[in-house]
Amino acid sequence: TVRKLFLLPGDGIGPEAMNEVRKIISYMNSALSAGFETDEGLVGGCAYDAHGAAISEADMGKAMAADAVLFGAVGGPKWDGVDYDVRPEAGLLRLRKDLELFANLRPAICYPALAASSSLKPELVEGLDILIIRELTGGVYFGEPKTITDLGNGQKRAIDTQVYDTYEIERISAVAFELARTRRNAVCSMEKRNVMKSGVLWNQVVTALHKEKFSDVKLEHMLADAGGMQLVRAPKQFDVIVTDNLFGDMLSDVAAMLTGSLGMLPSASLGAPDGKTGKRKALYEPVHGSAPDIAGKGIANPIAMIASFAMCLRYSFAMVAEAEALEKAIANVLDKGIRTGDIMSEGCSQVGTVEMGDAILSE
Ligand code: NAI
Ligand code: MG
């Protein structure tokens, strides 16, 4: 099998982190005949410098044709003044839009070795492994009307509109049920059906789809505010959480902080399955940005990027054993007390980006 990867390292620490993934890809090709074919492009500030756009049409074409896109990070002070349409973030937004990446997957995993440095009690988060699935292309961030109008009496009125159609709720909950089957087989859907019509429809559509196609998966419903409380009180009760764009934005950031550093957090964004092949378009990226403050120093933590590649193995190529091996390698390296600066703690040994990548690869 040929597996086509398109690499977009981007700016700042993006390329430094991507280099460590590249080593893993080469190893998998030579030692495991994994058949990865890689191509590489420019996104963000570096693309702007080269072509005056945050991503070129040629690179967009390659992203569309790939089985998966690996994305580093974009942005930096150098491009703070450039026009809105060609700012670095526009490259990522264009990819999300054209690849129709409606499902944003944000795992919150707490590696045992880091449980002590979590913001919560170690026993609450040790061994934590939950997956938050946020709807990414609909809801109140995009719904029309979206306006601020002058009411003429010294008052203004701001309107944002939450809109969800049945198909949007169906496709995001299908992703949740499918992925739950590969995990601990439980989905918790969160909305506010007590005060929002979109919550009523969300609840109905999830329930109907569950009954029709996924009745083997355990399904629970929670009001999103109560869900937020439970996420902090007893996060290990969850396996997969599925929710809308707004609630998902907040809940996934809360969950992220249960587990420690920005340098540890991977993410995936998935599109609809292709009608012919059933394969989903997908983009994998660390949650962190380009970290201009540490870029070029060789000290960035590559784990978020490497863990994003593990998600790629699992979700784009069904290489579950390989994904687990890579995640286990990360856990083992942390168990040995090897740390980059951002996750450094007493009694551990501090290494740079390349040494961390090497340690994970040899593990
Ligand atoms: P950031 O995530 O780049 O950095 C926040 C802090 O965390 C910094 O102190 C940084 O050194 C540290 N950090 C982040 N990743 C790290 C890693 N892997 N290892 C060690 N330390 C790490 O967020 P910030 O500073 O708000 O934004 C910097 C630039 O990145 C901006 O231009 C912003 O627009 C862009 N950005 C891009 C994103 C993307 O490409 N998806 C996401 C977030 C921000
Ligand atoms: Mg957010």
Image (cartoon, helix red, strand yellow):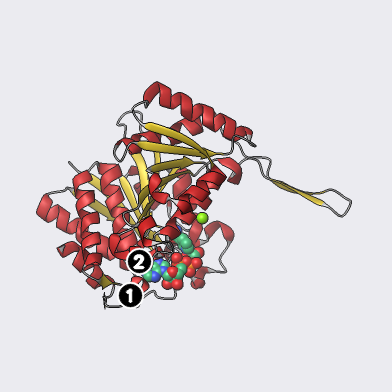
Say above or below: 51 vs 213. below
Which residue, given by chain and number where applicable, does mark 1 sit on?
345
How far across and how far down the image is residue 298, in percent?
31, 75
Residue drawn at x 53%, y 52% as measured from the top left:
250
Regarding residue 61, the answer to whether it shows in the image is no
Say above or below: 332 vs 138. below
Q: Earlier in the sequence, mark 1 or mark 2?
A: 2
Quadrant position of the C terminus in the picture? bottom left
Would you call the spot at circle 2 few (<14 residues within 10 Å), some (14-19), or many (20 or more)?
some
How far across and how far down the image is residue 361, in percent?
18, 62
Name the residue at the right extreme.
153
Which residue, given by chain and number where applicable, does mark 2 sit on?
116
**Residue type beneath disc 1:** Ser
Horizontal side, residue 296 vs residue 191: left or right = left
Q: Secondary structure at mark 1?
A: loop
Q: Are marks 1 and 2 in contact (CB under 8 Å)?
A: yes
